[in-house]
Image: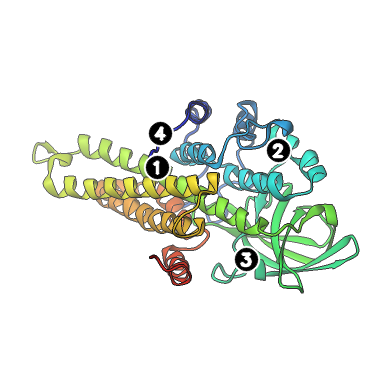
Amino acid sequence: MDFTFTEEQQAAVEAAKAVFAGVTPDAVPSPALTPGAVSEDLDRPLWSRLAAADLLGLVLPPEHGGAGLDPVAFCLVLRESARVLARVPLLETGAVAMTIARYADPSTAATLLPRVCRGELVLTAASHGLTGHDPADRAVTAHRDGTTWTLDGLQNAVPWAHGADLVAVPAHTPEGRTALALVPRTHEGVTLADQYSTSGELLAELRLDAVRLDSTEVIETEGAWERLRELLTTGTCALALGLGEAVLTMTSQYTGKREQFGHPVATFQAVAVQTADRYIDLRAMEATLWQAAWRVSTGAAGALPAAGDIAVAKIWASEGVRRVVQTAQHLHGGFGADTDYPLHRYHAWAKQLELSLGPAAAHEEALGDLLAAHPLG
């Protein structure tokens, strides 16, 4: 297994590091001290810098102004964004844009994707459903009459919906298929109600009441929603990895300076063992992430469908990032709860990522179903 990245992928990482270099995790009020959202909007200046660095079109086709790289490069950039808790819908916009490029009508892609590359169009996805436990595509119905679609239903916990221009909404049809609707945030019949994430970000309850869309605004191609969910889940694993690595670095620096009985606490065996265990978690998160991203990027065959590798990656991401931040809090002692210190912000984001698109238990169940359907010889 070769995890060597290409020159283009490494160049994307360097560009991302340059853009995120000036970003700090405490640019907004602490979620622990804020009863509502820490901010009403995404970080627009950062979004503009990402567009100027050509990172918003990184994985989009060159004919639309993109660089034509793959989901592996996308995950590398997401990992860098999580290290500084970048408050931008990079995951959602990139995943939806890749899905549009592959599955939407060419005229729709030609209209939307150049604007995404320029940072003019913000995209997000409604992937939570009603409760987070039921399939997201069952929360909304879609009925077609000629060239017009009518959507009804409700999706909870839609990230960045208040600042997005289009929301990709999976919906089930009377024929039992799943369509992916690109719903304008300000469209007639669309209502947004405030909700708040564990990390203090503004989410939305998205209600659709007889929302009528033209056929060009609905992707009917088989597999579009499944592809979008794969990209979102894999990207969430990349965010968890970047966050976990930043937290472990923070913990190592703290325990190397903090002294007890005249010695740095990092030299104590109990501290060293816990830190080593978390390092192993991160390496497992990394290996399973790149395996999943490689399957998504190449479509390579395996003993299980790519969904199996994605499930394994999300299991490790959910469990691993939780253990990393819990150990970090423990080793920081009371200092870890100080709201003037950024660790509590990482802890809040980690909990959000752990549960996003399903906790470890949900993916363990999905992996079990795949194993039952594809017995390993």
Residue depicted at x 66% and y 58%:
223
Q: Say whether residue 103 is left or right of residue 327.
A: right
Image quadrant holding the N terminus, namely top left
Q: Amino acid at mark 2?
A: Val
Q: Secondary structure at mark 4?
A: loop
Inter-mark Cα distance, 4 to 3: 35 Å
Residue at mark 4 to residue at mark 2: CA–CA distance: 29 Å
Measure the alpha-carbon separation of dots 3 and 2: 25 Å
Residue 163 visible from this viewpoint: no
Q: Which mark is residue 136?
A: 3
Residue linked to disc 1: 342
Viewer-proximal residue, 59 or 160?
59
* Amino acid at the residue labelled 3: Ala
Compared across the picture, whether 220 is left or right of 291 comes to right
Q: Quadrant of residue 204?
A: bottom right
The residue pinned by badge 2 equals 116
Mark number, residue 4: 4
Circle 4 crowding by C-alpha within 10 Å: few under 14, some 14–19, many from 20: few
Q: Quadrant of the C terminus?
A: bottom left
Does the residue at mark 2 contact the one at mark 1 (Cβ under 8 Å)? no
Residue furthest to the front: 377
